[in-house]
Image (spheres, rainbow, N blue to C red):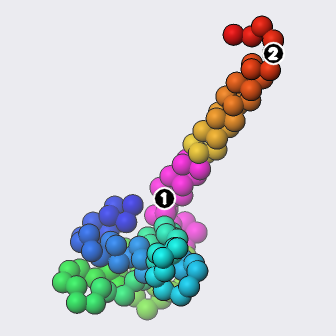
Amino acid sequence: MVRSKFPDLSAEEVVHRLTATAVDKGAPGRDEEYGYGVVDLVAALTADVPPLEGGAGPSTAATPSPTSNGPDSNAAPDPDDKSNVGSTVLVIALTALVAVGLLVTLLVLLLVRRRRRQPGAY
């Protein structure tokens, strides 16, 4: 998804964007249990991330987004802006798919357990 929104980023810059926007868990900074933290996809796609130090490539912090209008780019988001609709739909669809998968798994387990308890069942 980061590559879709920022196609000019190098692999190193994509990793930098993901680690810079991760939600830090555990000890401050990178640690053995959580690494750099939990990926925050919304932040990775929307946050202003400072350029990678020493990196030679396009910087997303210096590149204005198509919806930014100069100094007022920190203003409240436009409710008519449809740029994040695809991401929202994808997240909702994936969540629904996981929920349906868990429900089907639970039903199969219940049916197998019920069938084992019934005498004379296959």
Residue drawn at 74 percent across, 10 percent down: 121
Q: Name the quadrant containing residue 44.
A: bottom left
Residue drawn at 48 percent across, 86 percent down: 29
- Three-letter amino acid code at disc 1? Ser
Q: Tell me if residue 115 is in the magenta stretch.
A: no
SS for tag 1? Answer: helix
The count of marks equals 2
Q: Nearer the viewer, mark 2 or mark 1?
A: 2
Q: Which residue is mark 1?
A: 87
Q: Are marks 2 and 1 in contact (CB under 8 Å)?
A: no
Q: Which residue is mark 2?
A: 118
Residue 100, relative to residue 86: is it above or below?
A: above
The segment highlighted magenta reads 78-95
Pointer 2 or 1: first along the chain: 1
Q: CA distance from mark 2 to mark 1?
A: 47 Å
In which quadrant is the N terminus drawn? bottom left
Q: Residue 42: x percent and y percent?
A: 51, 69
Q: Residues within 10 Å of mark 2 (few under 14, many from 20)?
A: few
